[in-house]
Image (cartoon, grey):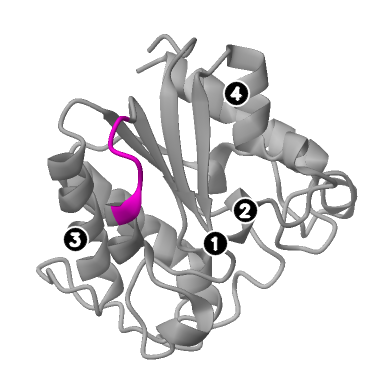
Amino acid sequence: MELKNKKINFLGDSITEGVGTSGPEHIYLNVIKSECGLAAARNYGISCTRIARQADEFEYGHPFCDRYKSMDDDADSIVIFGGTNDYGHGKAPIGTFEDRSEDTYYGAWHVLLRGLIEKYPKAAIVAMTPLHRQDEDTPSVGNGKPLKVYCDILKEVCEYYAVPVLDLYATSGIQPRVPILRDKYMPDGLHPSDEGNRRIASRLIGFLKAL
């Protein structure tokens, strides 16, 4: 896919919002805009938000499976980057692949992807898995599962809709349990630094160009 002059909507959480960077110009989507000449890199990142609807959504913000409806309509591509908060502090059940409800993690992915396909039938829709994080093997609050389970569900549902997935969990080169990598890319063990965002941007540029 040619990126120059394209309009891309980035739907995400605190990482997309820019937490961990030293300024907006270092957020991965703005790096991509600068390097690739995007016409627009629209930031729909809101800290603490999850894919699935939660009982505490008014405390943490509306979920991805609802927020996508308010994004600008003229995007050439949609990038979804979420799931780490569903693991980190989400309490919605994981559910099953057959779910089509916003109230489970499986179901919310179905709702989100189907909704995006219907809203943007001509756009290139892609998803990115969560990055590794320092506490990724700690059982999740809501389901007692490690982060990798949430990544695998993301990939499973995206495969059903033939939505391409950039597997950052497997290919980002960012693993905060390795001290030298944590210092450079993710000092707090969760949010990527300026260098971490450049790494994400590099991976995503190559991925989008290959579509």
Q: Secondary structure at mark 4?
A: helix
Q: CA distance from mark 2 to mark 4?
A: 15 Å
Picture quadrant of residue 78? top left
Depicted 61 relative to depicted 178: above or below: below
Q: Secondary structure at mark 1?
A: loop
Foreground of the two, 170 or 48:
48
Taking 7 as reference, is 195 left or right?
right
Q: CA distance from mark 2 to mark 3?
A: 23 Å
**Mark 3 or mark 4, which has the lower sequence index?**
4
Q: CA distance from mark 3 to mark 1?
A: 19 Å
Depicted 4 relative to depicted 178: above or below: above
- Expressed as whole percent of the image width and height from the top left, the position of residue 53 reads 32, 77
Q: In this rendering, does residue 120 appear at all? A: yes
- Expressed as whole percent of the image width and height from the top left, the position of residue 165 reads 37, 39
Residue bearing the label numbered 1: 46
Check whether the beta carbons of the residues at disc 3 and disc 1 lie within 8 A of each other: no
Indicate which disc residue 33 carries.
4
Residue bearing the label numbered 2: 17
Image quadrant occupied by the C terminus:
top left
- Expressed as whole percent of the image width and height from the top left, the position of residue 136 reads 61, 69
Q: Residues within 10 Å of mark 1 (few under 14, many from 20)?
A: many
Residue type for callout 4: Lys
Q: Residues within 10 Å of mark 3 (few under 14, many from 20)?
A: many
Check whether the beta carbons of the residues at disc 1 and disc 2 lie within 8 A of each other: yes
Q: How many marks?
A: 4
Image quadrant occupied by the N terminus:
top left
Give the residues drawn in magenta, as a range. 70-74
Residue type for callout 1: Ile
- Expressed as whole percent of the image width and height from the top left, the position of residue 208 reads 44, 22
* Residue at (32% x, 49% y) in the render: 155
Indicate which disc residue 111 carries.
3
Q: CA distance from mark 1 to mark 2?
A: 6 Å
